[in-house]
Image (tube, rainbow, N blue to C red):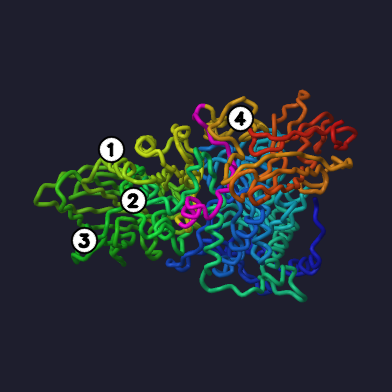
């Protein structure tokens, strides 16, 4: 799959050769957190990067800047729709151009190997083919508008626990067939302009090295065998060596301006440890990237797509952009269960609706970490339903208990600056000698990642007076990172001595520091508490300097059981109950892995009691990754709504009222019991994450082990029913020799099916390949292709599904090549990995695929 040299590489190479060594090396480390260095002698302007899996956050230069918040990648994957994915990529590009961003650090094509992975929501799927196809579509959309994608995290980076140090141990066949496969697919189909090397490393029996130093995978496979011509970018602060990473295939160290290259790399070149030709190649790759995104002055027309890139970009998001985000959220919603066709609701038959649940009150719209975007607007579930329901429908909202372990941040009306008496928390900035050199006042108790001080500040002292007037038991929580001391009325209640810098950022412990909770009894006369938090500034290198402090407070209030009782009474009195349960920012985020699959808090108890109170109950799961639903079989209607982004409320209303079909299909397997999960965790043991399951990832392992999930991979119902009538194969033999995973070789299937239900609908036709069990360890079934069709009620349609020859192949380690084992293969066509409606057979003989006789 090597690509031809770009047409003006010779001219670019001449430019590079004209630079001295130190000038070239200066270009290989970021200028700051998000920008690359410029070089006027090359005609090179600064290239700007931004995080982007769930939307383009921007560089943070404007602290008030907002952006479009899309549904999480797993929600997009649930739509099984390449056209929709490409349109979302185009939208990301428009948003990037609006913010002056040239490179979006997305998509993420790591696999959902275990459901407890912290970034599970940020990945597309547990399946390599589905992941690769949809990620390629996002890349095409982005780059069609002249904005670069950065494919990440290369490779086998599927755990957040100790993520900067662990090695993924897996054999070469598993690496090739599973974890490299989506990267190869995207490179073949969409040619991303940059790739990010992961924090973690790979141990595959040949090499054991961090990915930033893995010459075999970066230089031999990615750049050599696959012909990737762009730069390999380090994950932020992932580069720990000079010569080893330079020789290993890394091209750009981020962030900057500091790092292990610079003068040290120049010295390594002069000492003969690193060939200067490698440096030249790195600069050339950066210039190619700059040319793609229009940051390189050069004679002749730029080779980026001219027409889309010239389209004017509105200064503010337009209504059609909101509409697309709404469509993605709605169409990715999966209808898991719909007894007696409870859904869709008929608005004229509803007089009252009870909206219930912790996530009904506080929807979880996006995951934490790199995916975070400060949204330009958010539409809650309550707002969306209120706007969609007739005015005479009574809508009530009830939390039914808080699912969060942490208390809310202390609110402004309770806090007072001890010096002035005005509202808020005072921050005094202190130098190395303890002298005050600045300060400001914050309204609330949230001082997470506070960096509003100058370079001379060594400590930040927070002080406030908390006034509690409501009699009863108040709960206070204090959380800080690094070195700190917390006092209440002069008595120390919490202290820390963590001297780490950048490691605090990389494991996200500054976002969710350990908490100390204390109870305060308040009588009728009230109580005033003097709070002080003394924080040492954390120096996190390219991430900047900051402190973290959280002051949290909960007044006396009803117990969770009292809230559940209130919600149940409301459900019993309503025509319809909609219960929204799920995860929250404490559960799903970059930086840590989950410890289990249970819904947090008392949500299971809430659901069961509401179902018992009202037989017209719809349960909506607002979560990105699997959670256990022990009441699933009791639920009249069950929807999986993911982390739906800013248009959450409108999208849910569209689904409930039948305006949009929930045509999503699960991109992963939902377990019934935690003990059934094939890979229950990915915690390193002695620094190693061992991929003992081999090629049996996700639904393949469920099939291998003969386990029954709650809902299988690919499952989803929609508004109508389908009858699968026939399947035919391409009539002539096609070669099984494969030049690329997206090549034209393979099989074409024509599937005839009829919409036999009461409504128009969309059907995802899925094809699973069952290879011969000839002694080679192969999956029982694997996803080999899919497509979607739409039809009116009663209409007959045909679906054309391409099954690439790669689906039949295995990696032959001895030959270092792909091989197609001979034998009889069975193709299952149907609605999920466990719901086959039609079967066809082919044989492989003499390297060719033929319909079985």
As rendered, which of 747 and 538 lies closer to the eye? Answer: 747
Q: Is residue 102 above or below residue 112?
A: below
Residue 67: give x, y in percent of width and height. 49, 64
Residue 397: give its label: 2
| Residue 609 drawn in magenta | no
Find disc 1 in the rendering and name its residue: 561
Q: Is residue 60 above or below residue 557?
A: below
Q: Between disc 2 and disc 3, whose residue precedes?
A: 2
How much space separates mark 2 and mark 3, taking CA atoms?
A: 32 Å
Q: Is residue 708 left or right of residue 431?
A: right
Q: Residues within 10 Å of mark 2 (few under 14, many from 20)?
A: some
Find disc 3 in the rendering and name its residue: 416
Judged from this view, the residue extending furthest toward the top is 775
As rendered, which of 583 and 295 lies closer to the eye? Answer: 583
How much space separates mark 2 and mark 4, taking CA atoms?
A: 39 Å
Residue 702: give its label: 4
How much space separates mark 4 and mark 3, taking CA atoms?
A: 57 Å
Classify mark 1: helix, strand or loop.
helix
Q: Between disc 1 and disc 2, whose residue precedes?
A: 2
Q: In front: mark 2 or mark 3?
A: 2
Q: Which residues are magenta?
A: 650-675
Q: Between disc 2 and disc 4, whose residue precedes?
A: 2
Q: In front: mark 1 or mark 2?
A: 2
């Amino acid at each position: 799959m090597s690509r031809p040299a770009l047409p003006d590489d010779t001219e670019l190479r001449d430019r590079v050769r004209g630079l001295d060594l130190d000038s070239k090396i200066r270009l290989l480390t970021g200028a700051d957190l998000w920008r690359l260095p410029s070089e006027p002698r090359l005609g090179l302007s600064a290239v700007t990067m931004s995080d982007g899996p769930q939307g383009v956050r921007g560089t943070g230069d404007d602290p008030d800047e907002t952006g479009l918040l899309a549904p999480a990648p797993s929600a997009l994957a649930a739509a099984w729709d390449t056209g929709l994915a490409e349109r979302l990529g185009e939208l990301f590009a428009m948003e990037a151009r609006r913010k002056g961003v040239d490179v979006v650090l997305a998509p993420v094509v790591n696999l959902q190997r275990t459901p407890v992975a912290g970034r599970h929501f940020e990945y597309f799927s547990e399946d390599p083919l589905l992941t690769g196809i949809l990620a390629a579509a996002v890349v095409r959309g982005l780059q069609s508008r002249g904005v670069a994608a950065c494919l990440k995290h290369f490779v086998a980076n599927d755990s957040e626990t100790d993520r900067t140090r662990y090695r993924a141990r897996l054999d070469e066949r598993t690496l090739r067939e599973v974890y490299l496969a989506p990267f190869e697919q995207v490179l073949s189909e969409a040619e991303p302009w940059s790739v990010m090397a992961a924090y973690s490393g790979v141990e595959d029996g040949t090499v054991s090295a961090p990915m930033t130093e893995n010459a075999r995978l970066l230089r031999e496979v990615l750049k050599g065998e696959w012909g990737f011509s762009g730069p390999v970018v380090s994950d932020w602060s992932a580069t720990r060596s000079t010569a080893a990473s330079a020789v290993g295939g890394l091209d750009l160290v981020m962030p900057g301006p500091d790092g292990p290259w610079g003068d040290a790399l120049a010295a390594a070149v002069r000492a003969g440890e690193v060939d200067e030709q490698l440096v030249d190649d790195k600069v050339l790759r950066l210039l190619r990237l700059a040319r793609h995104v229009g940051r390189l002055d050069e004679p002749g027309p730029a080779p980026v797509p001219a027409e889309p890139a010239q389209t004017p970009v509105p200064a503010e998001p337009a209504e059609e952009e909101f509409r697309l985000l709404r469509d993605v959220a709605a169409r990715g919603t999966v209808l898991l269960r719909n007894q007696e066709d409870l859904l869709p609701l008929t608005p004229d038959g509803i007089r009252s609706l009870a909206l219930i649940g912790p996530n009904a009150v506080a929807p979880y719209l996006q995951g934490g970490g790199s995916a975070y975007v400060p949204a330009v607007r958010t539409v809650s579930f309550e707002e969306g339903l209120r706007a969609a329901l007739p005015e005479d429908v009574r809508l009530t909202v009830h939390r039914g208990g808080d699912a969060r372990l942490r208390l809310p941040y202390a609110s402004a009306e309770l806090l007072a600056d001890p010096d002035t008496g005005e509202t808020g928390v005072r921050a005094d900035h202190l130098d190395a000698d303890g002298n005050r050199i600045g300060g400001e006042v914050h309204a609330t108790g949230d001082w997470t990642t506070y960096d509003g001080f100058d370079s001379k500040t060594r400590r930040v002292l927070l002080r406030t007076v908390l006034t509690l007037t409501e009699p009863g038991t108040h709960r206070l929580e204090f959380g800080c990172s690094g070195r700190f001391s917390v006092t209440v009325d002069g008595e120390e209640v919490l202290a820390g001595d963590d001297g780490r810098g950048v490691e605090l950022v990389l494991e996200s412990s500054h976002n969710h520091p350990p908490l100390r909770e204390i109870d305060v009894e308040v009588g009728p006369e009230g109580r005033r508490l003097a709070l002080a938090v003394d924080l040492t500034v954390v120096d996190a290198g390219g991430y900047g300097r900051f402190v973290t402090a959280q002051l949290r407070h909960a007044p006396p209030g009803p117990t969770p059981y009292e809230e559940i009782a209130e919600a149940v009474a409301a459900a019993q009195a309503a025509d319809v109950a909609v219960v929204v349960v799920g995860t929250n920012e404490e559960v799903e985020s970059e930086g840590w892995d989950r410890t289990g699959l249970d819904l947090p808090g008392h949500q299971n108890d809430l659901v069961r009691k509401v179902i018992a109170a009202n037989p017209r109950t719809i349960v909506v799961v607002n979560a990105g990754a699997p959670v256990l639903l022990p009441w699933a079989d009791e639920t009249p209607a069950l929807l999986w709504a993911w982390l739906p982004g800013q248009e959450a409320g409108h999208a849910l209303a569209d689904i409930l009222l039948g305006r949009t079909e929930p045509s999503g299909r699960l991109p992963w397997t939902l377990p019934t019991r935690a003990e059934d999960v094939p890979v229950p965790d990915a915690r390193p043991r002695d620094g190693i994450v061992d991929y003992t399951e081999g090629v049996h990832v996700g639904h393949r392992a469920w099939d291998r082990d003969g386990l029954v999930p709650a809902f299988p991979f690919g499952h989803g119902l929609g508004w109508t029913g389908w009858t699968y009538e026939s399947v035919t194969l391409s009539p002539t033999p096609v070669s099984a020799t494969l030049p690329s995973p997206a090549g034209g070789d393979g099989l074409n299937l024509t599937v005839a099916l009829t919409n036999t239900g009461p409504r128009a609908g969309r059907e995802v036709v899925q094809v699973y390949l069952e290879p011969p069990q000839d002694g080679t360890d192969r999956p029982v079934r694997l996803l080999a292709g899919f497509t979607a069709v739409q039809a009116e009620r009663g209409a007959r349609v045909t679906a054309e599904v391409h099954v690439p020859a790669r689906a039949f192949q295995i990696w032959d380690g001895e030959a270092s090549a792909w091989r197609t084992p001979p034998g009889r293969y069975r193709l299952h066509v149907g609605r999920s990995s466990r719901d086959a409606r039609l079967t066809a057979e082919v044989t492989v003989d003499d390297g060719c695929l033929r319909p079985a006789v």
